Amino acid sequence: MSTVAPRSPLDGSVISENISRYWRVSVVEVTGSTQDDIAQLVAEEKAQHGEVIATEYQSAGRGRLDRKFDAASSSALMFSLYVKPQRDKSDWSFLTLLTGLSAIFALTKLDPGFTPTLKWPNDIVIGDGKVGGIIAQVIGDGVIIGVGVNVGMTQEELPVAHATSLALHQFPILDRNLILASFLTTFEELFERWQGGEDLRHLYCERSSTMGQQVRIEHPDGSYKTGKAVDVTLTGELILEDGSRVTVGDIVHLR
């Protein structure tokens, strides 16, 4: 049965009232891709650290490995942010994991009883259903991070069979303005801790549904590997029990 969820419009003033001056948030009704929008600002040298663009609908949204990301207008929280890390560039790939951690902490702040987890490398999950995903691209001296969270989607609106939404799990706050504000506040805190050299891997591992699981890693070239996931590196690679490291691939949790 479908869940009918209220879909308050994104409002930059509401978001800004609930975040620090660290961020500069813009809201657009329709765009091709918020990632491309920020990339254009970077190319024009107009992007600042803390730039955020959120949209009601994007016609060319994409996920990891350039997969298309579809969402009905106002049914998902879709945004990109731009940061200029001061850590060594080799460490930047951990930011995808840090972003996922920020997302589930932000949701838990809004509802302490809510327990989403993270599936390596970039899926936000509730049970076995994917509620959100993250992509990141290095551009110049910064990183553009894109986030998509299924907020008010009904069962009929879900893009794929293994997807889910906050509404379908009776999450009590479906106002995307408040969810985005909570995310940005949380990301700011974790990013500054990471910038200061803190090792945040333990926080990620504690909230990862992949850790301790027997997994199959399916590589883009069609090959695969199986093993037990035990940890992640400082750069976000998945470490298997045999000591091997995984940098890219789809993870299947084996039961």
Image: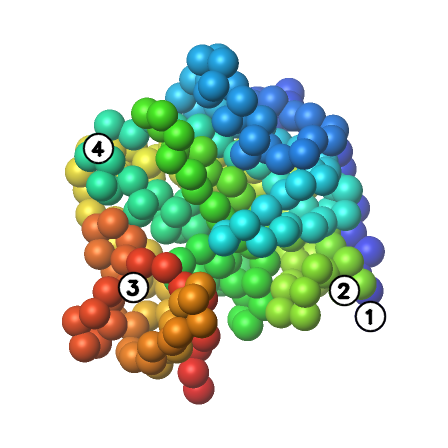
Question: Camera-side residue: 161 or 204?
Answer: 161
Disc 1 residue type (three-letter)? Met
Compare marks 2 and 1 and give the one earlier in the sequence.
1
233 with respect to 76 (left or right): left
Q: Which secondary structure lies at badge 4? A: loop
Q: Quadrant of the C terminus?
A: bottom left
Measure how far apart labels 2 and 1 are at the Cα level.
7 Å
Residue type highlighted by circle 4: Arg
Q: Where is residue 41 in the image (x, y as percent from the top left)?
A: 52, 19
How many numbered marks appear? 4
Residue 31 occupies which quadrant of the picture?
top right
Answer whether labels 2 and 1 touch (C-beta < 8 Å).
Answer: yes
Residue marked by disc 1: 1
Nearer the N terminus, badge 1 or badge 3?
1
Which residue lies under the disc numbered 2? Answer: 155
Q: Residue at x 67, y 34 (%)?
A: 32
Residue at 47% of width from left, 19% of height from top? 43
Position of the N terminus by quadrant: bottom right
Q: Where is residue 204 in the image (x, y as percent from the top left)?
A: 32, 56
Q: Distance between the residues labelled 4 and 1?
A: 48 Å
User: Disc 2 residue type?
Assistant: Gln
Residue type at mark 3: give it. Answer: Val
Question: Foreground residue, 214 or 67?
Answer: 67
- Hey, which residue is sitting farthest bottom in the picture? 255
Q: Mark 4 points at which residue?
A: 87
**Which of marks 4 and 3 precedes in the sequence?**
4
The way the protein has been coloured in the rendering is: rainbow
- Within 10 Å of disc 4 (Cα), the crowding (few <14, some 14-19, many 20+) is few
Decide if residue 103 is in sight here: no
Percent position of residue 220, x then y: 44, 64
